[in-house]
Image (spheres, rainbow, N blue to C red):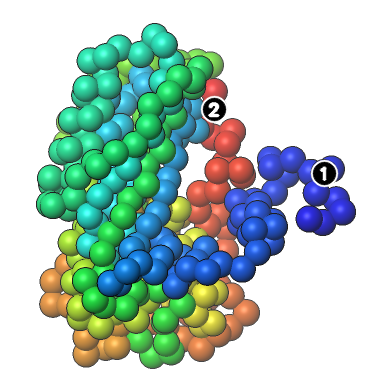
Amino acid sequence: MSADAGDLTVGELSEGRILRRILNVLGPSSALVGPGDDAAVIAAPGGSVVATTDTLVHGPDFRLAWSSGFDLGWKAAAVNLADIAAMGARPTALLVALALPNSTRVSFVEEFAAGLRGACDALAPGCAVEGGDLTVSDTLTIAVTALGSLDGRAPVLRSGARVGEVVAVAGELGHAASGLAILFERFTDADGHPLPLDVPSGRDGQAVLAQLRPSPPIALGTTAAVRGASAMIDVSDGLALDAARMADASGVSIDIHSRLLPDDVRTALTGGEDHALLATFPAELVPDSGFRPIGRVIARTGDPVLLDGRPFGGRTGWDPYRDWDSVTG
């Protein structure tokens, strides 16, 4: 631990810098794929297990005024299934831990369970909740561990992108961020506190649902692996930020073409929580359906991500330790 560690708070560092300090203390990993990718790959008799975990906390991650129990169960499952899919793996099981205030309605917990089951059935048939934990807390907290199988294949890592390959994406870009903006613009009071939600109709309603109940293209993770994807990542924190993570891991730069993005290019690049899958492929191996090209892998420049050949600057994505004020009123 560095000499100044005791003088800092987590609010003074980025998520990446906090994780680096933790990993420095933990030491080397013995896993087949350790910390630093979407999920770990752990050796097991007869093969390996892909494992990931994620936590949702009332306040920074969701608001009960906006999310039903079903919404939260669905989202808690979906965000973890996406990490398994980004490794090219097939989700097989979820373990769910709930920390509930004593005042929580039992019907809410049942709705939450229905959301978990609904997401598994719709996004990853054959995957189910197989255990977990239940405890009490003043703050509603949801922690999910997802497990998956590579079915004998090698994992698809962030570090495999090669110069000349096509950068492609499956799923939506910017929809969930647009939905979050609608929630804060229309469903908060003068002090920024959330108001009960009446889901809008049309495109605005679709954007809100993309935020509250994302539907990542889970099955396309294995499709990408089978078709020869060289690298892949779950776009959870924004296309630009997650593309930069892939570029850094692979020692390359990624040049994104704005004409291949949605009309709102800035939101497509910086908005998180759609949980699209970003992958790289040799040009002749891009799947015919599901993935759509958005750029190219190029030799490393001074910047990990470029937009139309120029360094992409400005806000690049979600960081819970940098963006806390935007979700607390």
Work out whether residue 290 can be spotted: yes
The answer to which of 29 and 287 lies nearer the viewer is: 29
Local secondary structure at mark 1 = helix
Quarter of the figure that contains the C terminus: top right
In the drawing, does residue 9 fall left or right of residue 34? right
Vertical relation: 75 (above or below) 149: above
Q: Position of residue 199 (x, y in %)?
A: 23, 26
Q: Position of residue 252 (x, y in %)?
A: 51, 82
User: Dot 2 corresponds to which residue?
Assistant: 328
Q: Residue at x 55, y 43 (%)?
A: 320
Q: Residue at x 33, y 63 (%)?
A: 49
Dot 2 or dot 1, earlier in sequence: 1
Local secondary structure at mark 2 = loop
Give amino acid for label 2: Thr
Vertical relation: 198 (above or below) 282: above
Give amino acid for label 1: Gly
Q: Which mark is residue 6?
A: 1
